[in-house]
Amino acid sequence: MARYTITPIPWGKTTGYKNLMTYLWGFGEPPIEAAQYCWLIQGDKLTCLVDTGGLPETLTMHGFPTELLEPVDVGLQKRAGVRAGDIKMVILTHLHFDHVENAKKLFPKAKYVVQKKELDGAHHEGSIQRSLYVLEHFADLDFAIVDGDTEVAEGIKVMFTPGHSSGGQSVLIDTEDGVVGISGLCTIQENYEPPEPMKSLMGVIVPGIHMDAQAAFESAKRLKAQCDLVLANHDKKWRTVSKIG
């Protein structure tokens, strides 16, 4: 059975209020530091990347003040000895600009795994998230389009987790430490490990940025239930972790 390790590739640091991530929870608390990542998955027969990251200035322009930690290609080389040109497959959790902006520049020859509903939603001109999709970032990419939960390689599955966006997906990876999920819902660890009374009442905290709060809630619960560990994709704690699994 295939087993993989996961290397966080942090590229940005963002400061904002916690309730931006935790819907109706954390109002009045001081600003927190969040992080921006790509995630490198490595096994005996496959190396792939989850998301491509973006540019701090683009996030800042959209109202999320962000500082560059290091470019994604530099992080891949320093943390894992992998060159950007070696990446042949990228799993896109969703198509918001901060998750796909580097695609054409750093990984132009990769195959991109994306949900059909996400690609359709990105082109919907009436979407409330229209400003978060920059079509030139992903126009003409070599897409492998999936529809729902799909095994993309032995030991790597995508789980359809809509709510943050119309067609988002999370990634489930078999590791020596069990099933590790990379959240496609923009979250911090508190979304999946909430304090009381939210832990008893809800199990998870709804992601703060969403186009469908109920769908995001159901997706977060489903993801947590199927994983031994969920990696919240904007939590700063993973910046200091070299490998998972």
Image (cartoon, grey):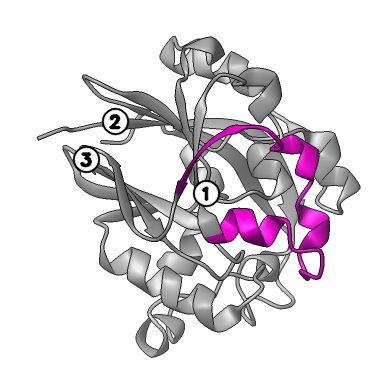
From what the image shows, is residue 95 above or below residue 138?
below
* Label 2 – label 1 distance at C-alpha: 18 Å
Q: Tag 1's secondary structure? A: loop
Q: Tag 2's secondary structure? A: strand
Task: Say few, some or many: other residues with alpha carbon within 10 Å of mark 2 (under 14 / 14 to 19 / 20 or more).
Answer: some
Q: Residue at x 78, y 70 (%)?
A: 128
Does residue 185 appear in this view?
no
Sooner in the amino-acid sequence: mark 1 or mark 3: 1
Region in magenta: 117-145
Where is residue 116 drawn, in percent x and y?
52, 56
* Label 1 – label 3 distance at C-alpha: 17 Å
Sooner in the amino-acid sequence: mark 2 or mark 1: 2
Horizontally, residue 136 falls left or right of residue 216, namely: right
Q: Residue at x 62, y 44 (%)?
A: 35
Q: Is residue 138 shown in magenta? A: yes
Check disc 2 and give the amino acid type. Answer: Thr
Q: Which mark is residue 155?
A: 3
Q: Quadrant of the C terminus?
A: top left
Q: Tag 3's secondary structure? A: loop
Q: Check contact, mark 1 vs mark 3: CB within 8 A.
A: no
- Label 2: which residue? 5
- Label 1: which residue? 93
Check disc 3 and give the amino acid type. Answer: Gly
Q: Check contact, mark 3 vs mark 2: CB within 8 A.
A: no
Give the number of the mark in front: 3 or 2.
3
* Label 3 – label 2 distance at C-alpha: 11 Å
Q: Which mark is residue 196?
A: none
Q: Residue at x 51, y 78 (%)?
A: 215
Horizontally, residue 227 falls left or right of residue 21, namely: left
